[in-house]
Structures are given as C-alpha cells and as structure tokens.
Image (spheres, rainbow, N blue to C red):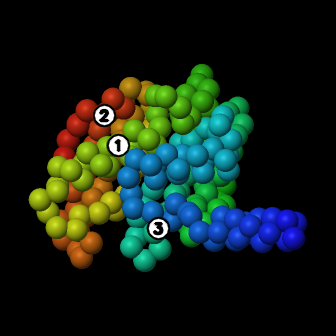
Amino acid sequence: MKALNFTIVAATIITLASCGWSIDNEPVNTEVFRSIEQEMKNKFGDDAYYTDVTITYNKSIGNSIQVTVTDDSDSLKMGQWKLAQGTWIKRSEVSLEVPEGNKATDFMFQLNEKINLIKLGELVEKSSNKLKNLENVVLHMALIRYPKNGDMGKTEYTVILKPENRGTTFTFMYTLNGELIKMDY
C-alpha cells in the first residue's frame, strides 16, 4: 500500500511539474527575470557568451526569450535561439565578424554580476512604477544592448512598456548600474 501511495504522489508531482509552472505566463517582475536567467543557464551553461538577449511579452503567448549565444568563446559561430511557450528553437547560425587584432570575447558578454537579468527585472519594475498612474501599462520588451565596439561600460539595459490596448510606447534606457540615461515616448 505504501508503494502505491508513493507512486501516486510521485506521478502527481511529475505531472504538475511538467505542465504547471513555467516562465511563459508569469507576471513580469524581478523573480521572473531570475527564472529566465536560470532557464538560459540551464540551456546554454553558466559560461555561455551572448551578443544579445531580448525578453518580449505578448498577452496571448506570454514571455519569449531571444538570444544570440555560443558556448565556445573562441568561435565566431553563434546560434540564434528563441524560447516561446516552453520550447527552445534554434532559428539560425550567425558568424561574428571581429576586427583584426581583437578577440571574439571583446564583443560578447556573460550573465554574471556585471550584466544580469535580475538587474533588468528590477529596472522593469522601476520603470513600471514611474508609470503607475497610467492604466494597464505592461512590459513589451526588455533587452541588453551590448555595444558593437565591445566597450562594456557603454552597455545599456532597455525597457519598453506600453498600454495593453495600444497607445504610447515608453522606452527607458539605463546604465549597467541602473542609472537612467533617458526616457523616450
């Protein structure tokens, strides 16, 4: 009888885990961005190198993640991947062009203490709070803009918010430290 009860409990947990929680339709907040970063690290590894990361929210499909990534920092070959509705799909392969005398890693970043999605999630919340007097403003897109010249100090977090039912789009650009560079609408 104990074995049967254990089997039922185990089957229930597996079923709930496989079709229950996901980052797809979670409300967008810092914890969701923490989960997204962990999802990316699970898929590509802790030491993966990126040239871009974009999180998009669409009410009908939820959150989607688009990245250009490699696990070989010496390679100029990178994959463009998208996660939507719980499935990672490799969309294409790209080749990174690096000026002579530079290393590929000069034009890539890793998710770590300096650049991370948790900070981006905090900035989404901060930007949303600035617009709290507007009705139904939601995340449209959040991204990390890494400069094409490889100057990490010029990296920007960008947050784009807009009303659920159309209207003005609000764009916030921040430094890596979270200081507002500019707000545009």
Where residue 179 sits in the image (x, y, percent)?
Answer: 25, 32
Where residue 104 sits in the image (x, y, percent)?
Answer: 61, 32
Label 3: which secondary element = loop
Q: Which mark is residue 14?
A: none
Q: Which mark is residue 25?
A: 3
Residue type (three-letter) at the residue carrying disc 2: Gly
Left or right: 177 as drawn, with respect to 102: left
Q: Earlier in the sequence, mark 1 or mark 2?
A: 1
Where residue 127 sits in the image (x, y, percent)?
Answer: 24, 49
Residue bearing mark 1: 122
Which residue: 38% across, 52% down?
A: 29
Between residues 119 and 183, which one lies in front from this camera angle? 119
Measure the C-alpha gap from mark 1 to mark 3.
Answer: 18 Å
The tally of labels here is 3
Assess whether mark 2 and mark 1 are in contact (beta carbons under 8 angstroms): yes
Q: 15 above or below 50?
A: below
Left or right: 24 as drawn, with respect to 77: left
Q: 157 above or below 131?
A: above
Assess whether mark 2 and mark 3 are in contact (beta carbons under 8 angstroms): no
Measure the C-alpha gap from mark 1 to mark 2.
Answer: 9 Å
Q: Earlier in the sequence, mark 3 or mark 2?
A: 3
**Which quadrant of the view contains residue 80?**
bottom right
Residue type (three-letter) at the residue carrying disc 1: Glu
Measure the C-alpha gap from mark 3 to mark 2.
Answer: 26 Å
Residue bearing mark 2: 178
Between residues 138 and 79, which one lies in front from this camera angle? 138
